[in-house]
């Protein structure tokens, strides 16, 4: 039986039955075309991003009576609209090897749904990339250099935790980051574009080339100085 899991809760546990899944607004790289007088073809002006993807499930909520249906729909709304101001993990039985980051993007009007006898749609606005399950497994590096292979055709924005006390350098490919005044560890989140230690900000302790990116293919990862090891959650992505 098909189902989806959103924010850690399964649709099956909520009594929902999926009739179909639709993917709208498939990610298309944003760009513009500009014509130049006297020149054949157009120039490509990239915007440098993919827009969100809309995922919609057509669902059925079985109930023997209208009061029972109303009660179930109220519970469904309480689940789906918890923390609607952030992305949550969305998984479904159609693709068990990947998941998405999604936020609810639909209006569930209970009275309207009652008139349709429990048949309605649930829509999510999702980040454009799908995340591979394999990319959530941390890779611990205790000696450098270390070769880390990105299995997809798209750059990944990893979460990196550097262990050590003092100062040193971490390198990914040809990019380098110098870290100072480190007390036991420091965290680098390329997706969030942030450097911290728990709740303590740490951007002022790092200088370097933006944030680490794991490009398609083999990436050389190394560390030096007072650092003893590095843990990387690679976050492999695909479309």
Image (spheres, rainbow, N blue to C red):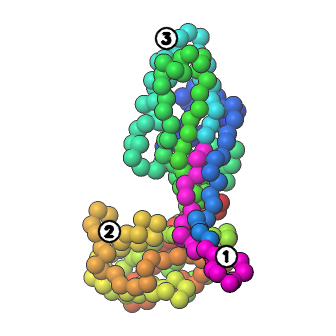
> Badge 2 is on which residue?
197
Query: Earlier along the polypeptide chain: callout 1 or callout 3?
Result: 1
Q: Residues within 10 Å of mark 2 (few under 14, many from 20)?
A: some
Q: Nearer the viewer, residue 230 or 104?
A: 104
> Badge 3 is on which residue?
67
Magenta highlight on residue 100: no
Residue at 63%, 80% (x, y): give it. 36
Query: Earlier along the polypeptide chain: callout 1 or callout 2?
Result: 1
Query: Earlier along the polypeptide chain: callout 2 or callout 3?
Result: 3
Q: Nearer the viewer, residue 59 or 68?
A: 59
3 shown above or below 120: below
- Element type at mark 2: strand
Q: Nearer the viewer, residue 35 or 139?
A: 35
Residue 42 numbered mark, or none: 1
Does residue 176 appear anywhere in the picture? Answer: yes
Q: Are marks 1 and 3 in contact (CB under 8 Å)?
A: no
Location of residue 91 in the rendering, given as x and y in whole percent from the top left corner: 59, 46
Magenta highlight on residue 52: yes
In the image, taking residue 164 as reference, residue 143 lies left or right, namely right
């Amino acid at each position: 039986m098909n189902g989806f899991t959103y924010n850690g809760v399964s649709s099956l546990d909520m009594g929902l039955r999926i009739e179909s899944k639709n993917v709208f607004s498939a990610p298309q790289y944003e760009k513009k075309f500009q014509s130049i007088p006297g020149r054949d073809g157009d120039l490509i002006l990239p915007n440098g991003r993919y827009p969100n993807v809309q995922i919609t499930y057509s669902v059925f909520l079985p109930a023997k009576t209208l009061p029972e249906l109303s009660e179930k729909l109220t519970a469904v709304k309480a689940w789906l609209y918890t923390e609607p101001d952030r992305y949550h993990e969305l998984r479904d039985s159609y693709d068990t090897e990947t998941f998405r980051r999604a936020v609810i993007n639909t209006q569930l009007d209970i009275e309207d749904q009652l008139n349709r006898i429990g048949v309605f749609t649930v829509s999510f606005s999702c980040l454009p990339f799908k995340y591979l399950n394999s990319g959530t497994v941390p890779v611990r590096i205790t000696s450098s250099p270390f070769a880390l292979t990105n299995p997809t055709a798209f750059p990944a924005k990893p979460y990196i935790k550097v262990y050590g006390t003092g100062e040193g350098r971490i390198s990914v490919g040809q990019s380098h980051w110098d870290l100072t005044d480190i007390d036991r560890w420091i965290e680098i989140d390329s997706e969030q574009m942030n450097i911290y230690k728990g709740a303590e900000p740490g951007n002022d302790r790092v200088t370097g080339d933006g944030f680490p990116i794991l490009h398609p293919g083999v990436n050389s990862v190394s560390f030096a100085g007072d650092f003893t090891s590095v843990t990387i959650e690679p976050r492999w992505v695909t479309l």
